[in-house]
Image (tube, rainbow, N blue to C red):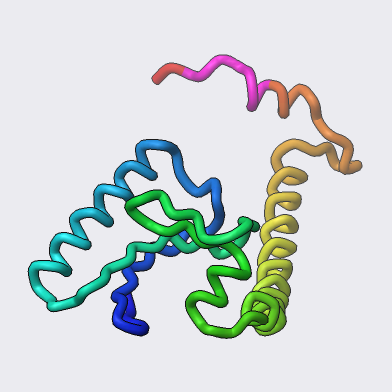
């Protein structure tokens, strides 16, 4: 939540416009109603505006449901920051961070792939590295041993 120009904004941030099913949207609306009621009882604020902000997506404007505003994409980032270009400006640093994590992920993925390949060769391949189909099919589909 934040205050701007005499209005307290209660903001729920969602990834995009298709984030939830109808019962989740209903629950969000009920949560907003309760939050507005609590804010009115405990603070002397003239205007309280619930907002559902979606990080990406397009909309022609601010959609007013009667309970809350729905704002998406560029409009949402502008609403939060006052910067019309924030939605573009935040992408570059996020891209750098994503690349760093992606590089780490690729190293880990390659190690796991190598380990699984080695296990498969040890368990299900002949000495010439061809697949021993009898062993593989028996492992996958053979009867379980009773104890």
Q: Position of residue 77 (x, y in %)?
A: 56, 74
Q: Position of residue 21 (x, y in %)?
A: 44, 38
Residue 16 vs 25, above or below: the answer is below
Q: Is residue 56 magenta?
A: no
**Left or right: 48 as drawn, with respect to 104:** left
Is residue 14 or residue 37 the one in the foreground? 37
Residue pictured at 83% horizontal, 37% vertical: 126
Total labels: the figure holds 0
Quarter of the rendering containing residue 129: top right
**Left or right: 113 as drawn, with respect to 27:** right
Residue pictured at 77% horizontal, 45% vertical: 121
Q: Is residue 141 magenta?
A: yes
**Left or right: 21 as drawn, with respect to 127:** left
Q: Quadrant of the N terminus?
A: bottom left
**Left or right: 36 as drawn, with respect to 124:** left
Quarter of the rendering containing residue 42: bottom left
Residue pictured at 13% horizontal, 78% vertical: 44
Q: Position of residue 142 (x, y in %)?
A: 61, 17
Residue pictured at 64% horizontal, 57% vertical: 58
Q: Position of residue 47 (x, y in %)?
A: 26, 71
Q: Is residue 96 visible?
A: no
Q: Is residue 137 visible?
A: yes
Quarter of the rendering containing residue 26: top left
Is residue 143 or residue 64 the one in the foreground? 64
Magenta-colored span? 138-145
Q: Quadrant of the C terminus?
A: top left
Is residue 115 or residue 69 the one in the foreground? 69
Is residue 90 or residue 38 the one in the foreground? 38
Residue 88 vs 120, above or below: the answer is below
């Amino acid at each position: 939540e934040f205050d701007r120009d005499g209005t307290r904004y209660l903001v729920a941030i969602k990834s995009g416009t298709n984030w939830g099913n109808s019962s989740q949207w209903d629950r969000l609306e009920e949560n907003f109603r309760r939050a507005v009621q609590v804010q009115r009882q405990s603070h002397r604020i003239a205007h309280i505006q619930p907002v559902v902000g979606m990080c990406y997506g397009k909309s022609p404007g601010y959609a007013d449901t009667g309970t809350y505003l729905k704002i998406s994409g560029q409009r949402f980032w502008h609403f939060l920051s006052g910067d019309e270009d924030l939605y573009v400006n935040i992408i570059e640093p996020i891209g750098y961070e994503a690349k760093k994590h992606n590089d780490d992920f690729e190293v880990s993925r390659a190690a796991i792939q190598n380990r699984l390949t080695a296990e498969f060769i040890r368990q299900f391949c002949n000495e010439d590295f061809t697949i021993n189909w009898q062993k593989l099919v028996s492992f996958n589909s053979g009867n379980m041993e009773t104890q």
